Image (tube, grey):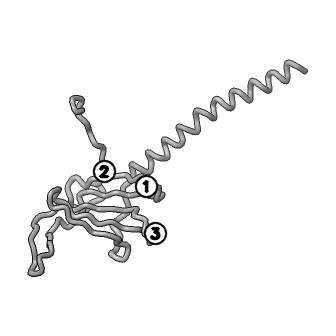
Amino acid sequence: MISLLRKTRRRRRSVRKVSSLIVPLFLLWSLTAIASAAPPIEPEDEYLVNEEVNSIAGLYFREYSLMQNGVIDYKTARQIIVSEYNEFWNTVVHTKEHPLFYWYDENQDGHMYMWVDQKVEGCSCDIILYEATYSENAQ
C-alpha cells in the first residue's frame, strides 16, 4: 500500500514538471504566431482617431481604434514626399500611397507589434515583422 502511494506521488510530480515546461512553450508559440502574421489591412477613415505630421522624421502617422472605443490599437506611418503650407499656413503633405510602417495591438493591452513594408507597395507579401537591430558597440 505504501509503495503504491509513493508511485502515485511520483507520477503527480512528473506531470507537474512536464506541464510547467509545456505551458511556457505554448505561450511563446502563440505570441510568435501573432507577431509573424501580417497586420490587418488599413481600416476606413471612420475608425481614425488621430493624425500627426512629423516633418523631421519625414512620416505621416494615422492612429485608429478598430473597436471604436477610443483606445488606439492600430497605427500606420507613411513616408512624406513633399511638405508645404497652404494659404492658411496649415501643413499639407503628399505621401506614398501605402504605409511604410504598421503597428497593431490585437488585445488592446498596450503592446503593439510593428511591421515594415519593404517595398512600400502595399503587397502583403512584402510586409514583414520589424525587428530592430542594435550594434554591439552602442551604449
Q: Residue at x 78, y 26 (%)?
A: 9
Where the N terminus falls, by quadrant?
top right
Alpha-carbon neighbours of circle 3 within 10 Å: few (<14), some, or many (≥20)? few
Identify which amino acid the numbered label 1 is placed on: Gly
Mark 1 or mark 2, which is nearer the start of the sequence? 1
Where the C terminus falls, by quadrant?
top left
Q: CA distance from mark 3 to mark 2?
A: 24 Å
Q: CA distance from mark 1 to mark 3?
A: 14 Å
Q: Residue at x 22, y 52 (%)?
A: 118
Q: Secondary structure at mark 1?
A: loop
**Label 2 close to label 1 by CB (< 8 Å):** no
Question: Is residue 36 or residue 107 the one in the foreground?
Answer: 107
Identify which amino acid the numbered label 3 is placed on: Met
For residue 39, what is the image quadrant?
bottom left
Alpha-carbon neighbours of circle 1 within 10 Å: few (<14), some, or many (≥20)? few
Q: Position of residue 2 (x, y in %)?
A: 88, 19
Mark 2 or mark 3, which is nearer the start of the sequence? 3
Mark 3 or mark 1, which is nearer the start of the sequence? 3
Q: Residue at x 40, y 49 (%)?
A: 35
Q: Secondary structure at mark 2?
A: strand
Q: Is residue 70 above or below residue 103?
A: below
Q: Position of residue 45 (x, y in %)?
A: 33, 75
**Label 1 close to label 3 by CB (< 8 Å):** no
Q: Secondary structure at mark 3?
A: loop
- Residue 128's tag is 2
